[in-house]
Amino acid sequence: MRLKKAAEQESLPSVMDLPVGGMTYAQCPALWTFFQGRTLASERMPIKVFDRSGTSHRYESGGLNGIERVDEFHRMELVKLGAREQTVEAAGALAEYFKRLFEESDEWLEFQNLSINGTTYPKGFTVKLQSGEPLWSGCSGIGLERWTAVFIAQKGPDPSKWPKAMRELYGETPRGIRFL
Ligand SMILES: [Zn+2]
């Protein structure tokens, strides 16, 4: 390749290693590797984790279009672990917070999950509870890009029409690139 100044695609596999990892497609799998193979002390349950350690990646096909369709998003994930009742209760409390936050909005757009995943992740990553009860988990994945898309869909792209609190946070629109 160095000599010919061209990459022959057929010969690439012979000089490459096999993949040893991948980019996470969803929110919480990145966090579960931290707990993998461990047993959690019952007296510290429930555990609530706020993770914004990186990005998640997926090619979103289907019904999504425009700026709401993303291939990479900045992950913010709220994960709850505990016994069954603790996980269900934490999800209920979070649902109340979300209602308070979003019901002021007069239009609805779906943009966020709130899931009770049961034993799926603890089983998949072999994470146990000291008491011997099944460990449950729940999560809510926040995509900042998705929130932005929903906000702009409802309020429009012109900052002068946004609510005052948002205008103050946003500040001035930077000057864009101009081509001649
Ligand atoms: Zn999740």
Image (cartoon, rainbow, N blue to C red):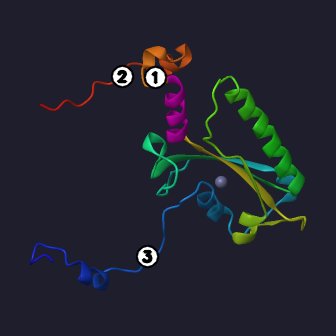
- What quarter of the picture does the C terminus occupy? top left
Q: Is the magenta stretch mostly helix, strand or loop?
A: helix
135 relative position to 31: left or right:
right
Q: Can residue 84 be seen in this view?
A: yes
**Label 2 vs label 1: CA separation?**
8 Å
Name the residue that disc number 2 marks: 173
Q: Which badge, 3 or 1, comes first in the chain's sequence?
A: 3
Q: Find residue 25 and report its horizontal and vertical position in percent.
A: 54, 59
Crowding at dot 1, Cα within 10 Å, few <14 / some 14-19 / many 20+, comes out as few
The label number, if any, that marks residue 170 in the structure image: 1
User: Separation of disc 3 and disc 1 at Cα?
Assistant: 41 Å
Left-right relation of 153 to 126: left
**Residue at image coords 50%, 36%:** 149
Disc 3 versus disc 2: distance between alpha carbons?
42 Å
Q: Residues within 10 Å of mark 3 (few under 14, many from 20)?
A: few
Residue drawn at (71%, 46%) of the image = 114
- Would you say residue 135 sits in the magenta stretch? no
